[in-house]
Amino acid sequence: MRICIVDYGVGNLFSVEKAFQYFDAEVNVSEDADVIASHDALILPGVGSFQAGMDGLRIRGLIDVVQKHVAEEKPLLGICLGAQLLLTNGKEFGEHRGLDIIHGDVLHFPALADNRKTPHIGWNTIEPASQKDWKGTILDNLPDHPEMYFVHSYILQPNGNKAVLASTEYGGCTFPSVIRKGNVYGCQFHPEKSGKHGLQIIQNFLNIK
Amino acid sequence: MKKIRIIPRLDIKGPNIVKGIHMEGLKVIGNPPEIARRYYDAGADELLYMDIVASLYGRGINVELVKSVAREIFIPLTVGGGIQSIHDINNVLHAGADKVAINTFAVGHPEMLQDAVRQFGSQCIVLSIEAKKSPAGTWEVYTDGGREHTGLDVVEWAKKGLSFGIGEILITSVDNDGTRKGYDNELIQALELISPVPVIACGGAGSMDSVKSVLQQNAIDGIAMATALHYADYSIHDLKKYLYDANFPIRI
């Protein structure tokens, strides 16, 4: 599987790249529409605001490329902001249109219990949501209650529970931490920073048929 | 539930990891990427990489060395030492850091913290404070690896940093650094009381019990430590098991 990390100008890609290189994957980084379109699987990384992310894709002419890739049922993994962009609308500093690959919104955390602050930063567990079993998904072969590394203030809110593969609790709020539609996955946490369990997710993604 | 982070601290001088007592009398511990890998494998939750002479000699951080460490680990990495500009922060982030820790330059140019937060977000900017106890019973801010005193009160300086939007405070007791006599609980508590952002305690970790004690007495997000790990008093895995068994939220 030839992997392309989509460079749309938000955040550093070194960590994501080395996580794929760890498995000797053929991985390239590109902001060029034609180069990106020539790959089997895409990674949408990113740190920053929803609007900056969509603007970054738009000015490089990458929105169509990503949507076409998904329409062909090829694998895509969105990480953090990259996962949020998969939804219909981002409600951060106004309302912004997303890629609309999975229907739903991106919202700020509600008021949290126990004086918990946003951003939510640190290690937290992910738990099964819409399906009891993660078999055959990118969460296959993980132990119970695996811990992942999170850094975010906004949460994924797909319409209905079906797209929610895993959820996480913080300050009394249970939010989707992994969303899925077919071969498209979005992780709110950073698998490339989540130790061996994060690496397991990367490896599972590389094994998608 | 969010977990308490156990963070090995790598003090870097030239190509080596070093460690001293009260930040002086540095001894070479070993090769940075090799030791980073060992701590990652043993279950570290994050690594702290501090170039402890960059500020003193007024030179930039060795980005290639940061990269060589980042390449070995798949956990968050915080990098500090000699950070003086937005440009420096960018370089370190591109080398694989997730956060930067700023001390010396911020003391002379506090507005820099605000610029850094605006540019990279508060989650990226750690205020690193080196503290020495004064005869009056308060703490004074030190810079340049615990060498230069500033006249600033630690708690007041922390409040100023917080007003600029910094996302985390790393508090190092220069008095306890390298001594294994335990953390300076009063210092940690003084900061924990005023800080709405995570506080990471550093300086003095000795026995596993001394680590448990600082966590019992303070609602802090993490502890950083060096000497006890470098000299293999116990492993990170042993420490985490010990704290987990004592019912602290720990990632095993």
Image: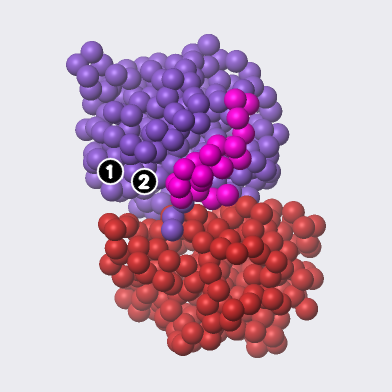
Per the rendering, the mark at residue B195 is 1
* A167 lies left or right of A61: left
Classify residue A8 by image quadrant.
bottom right
Mark 2 nearby-residue class (10 Å; few <14, some 14–19, many ≥20): some
Q: State whether discs 2 and 1 lie on one chain.
A: yes
Label 2 sits on a secondary structure element that is loop
The answer to whether A164 is drawn above or below residue B5 in the figure is: below
Amino acid at the residue labelled 2: Pro
Q: Is residue B182 magenta?
A: no
Per the rendering, the mark at residue B198 is 2
- Identity of the residue furthest to the left in this view: B136
Q: Nearer the viewer, residue A146 or B10?
A: A146
Where residue A173 sits in the image (x, y, percent)?
37, 69
Give the chain of mark 2: B
Amino acid at the residue labelled 1: Ser
- Residue drawn at x 49%, y 24% is B206
Position of the N terminus of chain B, as image quadrant, is: bottom left
For the residues bearing labels 2 and 1, Cβ distance under 8 angstroms: yes
Where residue A185 sits in the image (x, y, percent)?
60, 75
In the figure, the shade used to draw chain A is red
Q: Is residue B243 magenta?
A: yes
Q: Alpha carbon of mark 2 to alpha carbon of mark 1: how far?
A: 7 Å
- Residue drawn at x 67%, y 33% is B35
The answer to whether B116 is drawn above or below residue A158 in the figure is: above
Give the chain of mark 1: B
Which colouring convention does the figure follow? by chain
Label 1 sits on a secondary structure element that is loop
Which range is magenta? Answer: B232-252
